[in-house]
Image (cartoon, grey):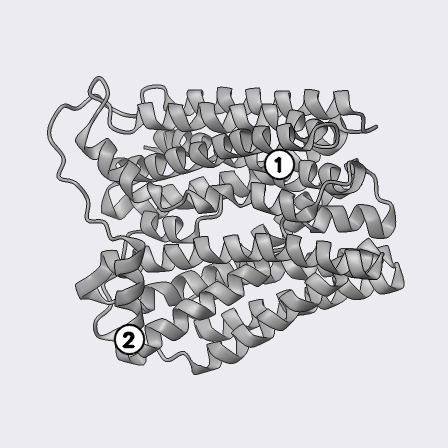
């Protein structure tokens, strides 16, 4: 089973690898080097989250309609191909936009849309496959292996990109994206070899809920409603900086593309360490305390980052990145546990779907809001650094609001009714490739 877990991890790694060039490198090049609107970059980067509701339909469709007896493999392959196509063509979007805006926008929607569709096809399919292959008792180990490999791959991909982009040239950017895309495709295909057995037996379709039904069900319970909006605000703040951190480093400190790409590896190492620490604390320290520590760490991280822009101090900036990564890791584990506590036994599918919906909404809001605010403030202040500082200040304020909301969340009334979802469902909730 260890071999199969590693293979599943390789599929997870392949999809995660394609995200790194787009979110940690291309966004910086588009915003700083090519002066593309951060709002447009944010909208393009948010397409995967706009498409996220189709995951329920994809999972149900693959249950009903296997291809040559395989229910997951064909959809994973399709997802891999679309994500790789998206990442290798994305530099073309960046260099087309300054020359022909309308053609660039059209191409951008197609290319980033390809990546977004591929992400949703692949992720729901390989998580379903992991669930089916591992069994109830083995799922925790499977997902632990998958997550560890995924975070490690993000760190290594960022380091590799920083070397391939030194010095930065358009040709080096295109070449590096092709290399990452091809390596991701090879690793993903290696992970698929023999991992799924052909089976023609009928599988009952899994229960699914529309977004309207999930939202209506959540709003009937005050504590669930509070927790839903707590998640939206918290995650929008923590994850909304994804497309802005590297461009900020370039414009505030004149960091090279290689240096800003390394930010992702530093952040990833801090997240990984914090995940391990939070995992060790689980059961020993109250999860709300760990969640609060994570939230405060991320908040102070944003404060240091915005102060670094005002002081033009690179050391303060890196300290902020470390705190932000640490806070993200601590928040991830503790809030996943809180999600499970806020899941009622009689409506497990509805609540799991609702927390996943909160994740998608928060990413969409955080990404688009960050890009729009940055552009608007920059236009008025005539200083791009001011735009970033205002965004980071808003995200710090959102974290403060979420910490106030956290103090009001009471899971006691849910404890007697909790039906623990599978570990794979936890990974689906997290939604972090």
Q: Taking 210 as reference, is 217 above or below it?
A: below
Nearest the eye: 352 or 323: 352
Q: Can you tell which mark lies on residue 221?
A: 2
Density class for disc 2 (Cα within 10 Å; few <14, some 14-19, many ≥20) is: few
- Position in image of residue 18 (x %, y %): 55, 32
- Give me the residue at 52% from left, 29% from top: 110
Earlier sequence position, callout 1 versus callout 2:
1
Q: Report the Cα–Cα distance between label 1 and label 2.
A: 39 Å
Which is more toward the observer, 207 or 38? 38
Q: Identify the residue shown where x is 46% and y is 70%.
A: 230
Q: Residue furthest bottom?
A: 408
Q: Position of residue 300 (x, y in %)?
A: 69, 69
- Crowding at dot 1, Cα within 10 Å, few <14 / some 14-19 / many 20+, comes out as many
Query: Which quadrant holds residue 141?
Result: top left
Q: Residue at x 77, y 24 (%)?
A: 170
The reply to whether callout 1 and callout 2 are in contact (CB within 8 Å) is no
Closer to the camera in the image, 13 or 210: 210
Residue linked to disc 1: 22
Front in this rendered view, residue 401 or 378? 378
- Decide: is 352 above or below 143: below
Res. 401 visible in picture: yes
Q: Relative to 237, is 420 on the left or the right?
A: left
The N terminus sits in image quarter: top left
Instruction: Indicate which disc residue 125 carries.
Output: none
Q: Residue at x 56, y 76 (%)?
A: 401
Q: Which residue is at the far top?
A: 68
């Amino acid at each position: 089973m260890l071999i199969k877990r590693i293979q599943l991890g390789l599929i997870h790694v392949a999809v995660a690898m394609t995200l790194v060039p787009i979110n940690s490198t291309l966004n910086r090049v588009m915003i700083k080097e090519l002066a593309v609107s951060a709002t447009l970059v944010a909208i393009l980067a948010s397409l995967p989250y706009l498409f996220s509701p189709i995951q329920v339909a994809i999972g149900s469709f693959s249950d009903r309609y296997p291809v040559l007896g395989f229910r997951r493999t064909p959809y994973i392959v399709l997802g891999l191909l679309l994500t790789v196509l998206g990442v290798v063509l994305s530099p073309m979007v960046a260099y087309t936009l300054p020359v022909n805006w309308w053609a660039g926008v059209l191409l951008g929607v197609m290319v980033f849309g390809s990546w977004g569709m591929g992400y949703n096809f692949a992720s729901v399919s390989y998580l379903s496959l992991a669930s089916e292959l591992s069994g109830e008792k083995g799922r925790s180990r499977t997902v632990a292996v998958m997550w560890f490999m995924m975070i490690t791959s993000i760190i290594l991909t960022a380091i590799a990109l920083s070397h391939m982009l030194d010095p930065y040239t358009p040709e080096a950017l295109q070449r590096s994206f092709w290399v990452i895309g091809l390596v991701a495709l090879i690793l993903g295909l290696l992970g698929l070899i023999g991992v799924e057995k052909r089976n023609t037996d009928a599988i009952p379709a899994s229960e699914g809920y529309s977004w309207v039904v999930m939202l209506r069900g959540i709003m009937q319970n005050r504590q669930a409603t509070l927790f839903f909006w707590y998640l939206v605000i918290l995650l929008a703040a923590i994850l909304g900086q994804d497309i802005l951190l590297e461009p900020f480093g370039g414009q505030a400190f004149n960091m090279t593309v290689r240096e800003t790409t390394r930010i992702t590896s530093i952040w990833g190492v801090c997240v990984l360490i914090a995940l391990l620490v939070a995992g060790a604390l689980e059961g020993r320290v109250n999860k709300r305390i760990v969640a609060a520590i994570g939230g405060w760490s991320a908040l102070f991280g944003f404060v240091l980052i915005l102060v670094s822009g005002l002081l033009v101090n690179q050391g303060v900036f890196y300290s902020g990145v470390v705190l932000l990564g640490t806070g993200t890791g601590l928040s991830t584990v503790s809030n996943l546990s809180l999600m499970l506590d806020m899941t009622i036994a009689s409506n497990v599918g509805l609540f799991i779907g609702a927390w996943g919906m909160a994740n998608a909404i928060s990413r969409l809001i955080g990404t688009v809001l960050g890009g729009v605010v940055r552009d608007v403030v920059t236009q008025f202040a005539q200083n791009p650094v001011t735009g970033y500082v205002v965004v980071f200040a808003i995200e710090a304020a959102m974290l403060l609001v979420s910490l106030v909301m956290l103090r009001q969340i009471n899971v006691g009334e849910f404890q007697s009714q909790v039906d623990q979802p599978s570990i794979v469902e936890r990974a689906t909730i997290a939604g972090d490739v």
